[in-house]
Image: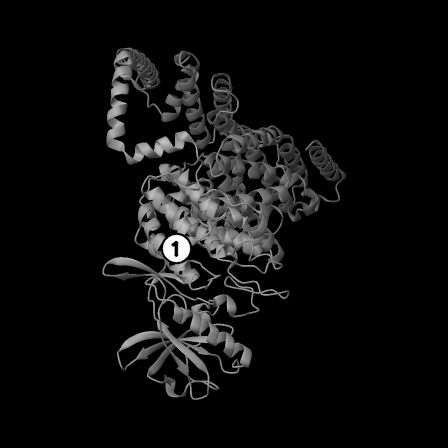
Amino acid sequence: MPESPLDAPDTNSSDRTLSTGGPGGPAAGQIGPYRLRQQIGEGGMGEVWLAEQKTPIHRTVALKLIKAGMDTKNVVARFESERQALALMDHPNIAQVYDAGSTPEGRPYFVMEYVPGLPITEYCDKHRLTMRERLELFEQVCDGVQHAHQKAIIHRDLKPSNILVVEQGDKPVPKIIDFGVAKAMSQRLTEKTFFTEMGVLVGTPEYMSPEQADLREQNIDTRTDVYSLGVILYELLAGALPFDAKTLRAAGLEAILRVIREVEPPKPSTKVRSLGESSAATAEKRREEPRSFARRLQGELDWITLKALEKDRARRYGTPNELAADIARYLRNEPVVAGPATAGYRIKKYAARHRVGFAVAACVVVLLIGFVIAQAVELHRIRLERDRANRERERANRISDFMTGMFRVSDPSEARGNTITAREILDKASAQIDTGLAQDPELQAQMMYTMGFVYGNLGLYKKKTLLVQRSMEIRERVLGPQNPQTLRSAEELAESLFREGRYDEAAKLIRQTLAAQRRVLAPADPDIMDSQVTLGNVLDDSGHFEEAEKVDRDAIAEWSRVRGADDTKTLACRTNLAIVLNDEGRYADAETVDRATLADKRRVYGDDHPSTLLSMGNLATDLGMEGKFAEAESLQREGLAIQKRILGPEHPRTLSSMNNLADTLIKEGKYDEAEPLLLQAREIQRRVIGPQNPDTAVTTYSLACLATHRGRNEEALSLLREAMENGLPPYITSRLDEDDDLKPLRGDPRFMALVAHAKEAAAAAQKSK
């Protein structure tokens, strides 16, 4: 049984005592005809035991026993009062009292029906009950609470765990348990019932009525239970509480009480919409379509639930019976009391109840009107279909002509026997796209965006920049500057500018794009995450480490919640965070993040995926900065071999890996191995991505460091000056005078002049930002 069927505050199973002995405990686990098997609950004044009755009948029961040491006159009187009150009730939806008595030590007890059921919300979700089935089950709960009220008993702690559902003859039957729980006192502020120092605060926060949360209010009546029933109904329908439990409890006692008393809950339909994609699982448990789930709640179910949750109890349903009656009206398609008393609403409900007659009358009217307009509608439809077909045919012809032109270069008569590469086909297509698709600007922009993306994957960022910039300009003109497709082109342009080392332009554009996306897209849209990743990269490479770290951590937290820790974009953000930590000099922290991310990527993607290789290289960099050169070199050689095979020997990432391996070899003193690697990488970089690219500048910088180790200081100064002129990233230039590889140059005034120039440039960039 998940919860105790008596008046003690709930106790987690991990806190329950399972022994039957102890000081003052029942001897040999036996009380009268009841053999105690296991303690299943404990409250302020009582213990709850699972017991077995042998005579006069054999059955399993729940036995509540007053605690040893708690048998004062006042407590015993309260215990007896509760026992008598429970004995008065006789209802199929309330746990039944069987027996009462006292132990030889004089400790009172009473015996109740043992309810081996599930909380009502768990039962409904497990069995995927429909909205109608949930409402019919809830009506039984209202009937049970109404019976208790007729016996002058107010539950005061109604919640799903105190309403257990059992199956009797294949029919679910709810059983209300724990009557009198509010009378048991406790000083713990837990997820269960709790109390204040000023007076007794009775109930569970998420289900507590406003008057219970007002310590000055002494006049608690039956409408308090109606409010709690309203919260349970809310949870049964929407799959969530009106106020999030974690947020509510994290706010502290005073804030909890204020929210309960003053803050109006959202409509159940509004709550469902706010859950975003996570509401799909909730809809499935109700056998509802995710797209229509919120609409199903909108209207009458919203009205009924919010009337039960009125802050002013005078506006609430007066009794559980009134709440149940309104639910019954809804199920019979009758106007509900909670709804507006408008003529249109009543006619709508009348039509729903008298579908056949109303349909016949409506058909007569519709036929008269429909006959007049049917021909016009059909003519209009035919015209629209014809126009649409013409547009689609024209677009298909344009695509066909353009693609034919792209691949004509591979025709033997065009190629003249030469081998044609995919790169050459792509180059020809990009040169012809301005004229080839001019009649369809939307299609033209999409093709430009796609080809630019491919150029980026090939590491050809200048070509990518030209194409995605044209794509953005066309989309701004045709679709508007706030259109999601326009903003997608803007994000790709910012990413390409960043890869070219044009940090200021990239930072300005990506900030504008991200702000616009947050205005027009849903919070969990993947385009927003792409922009956050790009912003973090730009901030990191331009030396704004603190802001970059915050952007990356915020993105990880948000995306882990929305898509999970193994999502592609979550893993990308974790990779970027580790890079920032490394650039900040926090190498041990970076190693921790990179190791965990690499393990996850190997599991999700496999060893040969480019993203896995990126994390492998980053971890090696961390290890090198910590002096773990042997492990770093091993990882870098493994990753470089895979990159050459997967990405090719001239891909920018392959060349960056060659540079990183050379840096490790320099630190190990293996200068003869490092130098040819660096020279080869720089030669390819100058040819493929150009001399004035940050990656090329970084390789030149590594050659300068190698020259100092070999005592060639003049060569080192020349290489360092070349690297700075060609776009050496700020995260390196800002620490020139701290780099131990350049230590031999620190006494040279020419080197100090270069350092001063770098710091002035960094200060100017910060001021501009």
Residue 711, compared with residue 96, is above or below; it is above
Residue 516, given in percent of the width and then of the height, sits at: 55, 29
Quarter of image, res 538: top right
Q: Is residue 371 left or right of residue 451?
A: left
Q: Residue at x 62, y 56 (%)?
A: 254
Residue 373, given in percent of the width and then of the height, sits at: 29, 13
Residue 288, given in percent of the width and then of the height, sits at: 33, 42
Quarter of image, res 647: top left
Q: Nearer the viewer, residue 327 or 684?
A: 327
Q: Secondary structure at mark 1?
A: helix
- Classify mark 1: residues with Cα within 10 Å, few (<14), some (14-19) or many (20+): many
Residue 63, compared with residue 182, is above or below; it is below
The residue carrying mark 1 is 142
Q: Is residue 661 visible?
A: no
Tell me which colouring the rendered structure shows: one colour
Q: Nearer the viewer, residue 496 or 626?
A: 496
Q: Dividing the image into 4 quarters, which one contains the C terminus?
A: top right
Q: Residue at x 36, y 64 (%)?
A: 94
Q: Is residue 501 left or right of residue 19?
A: right
Q: For the residue marked with disc 1, what is the amino acid?
A: Cys
Q: Residue at x 45, y 34 (%)?
A: 650
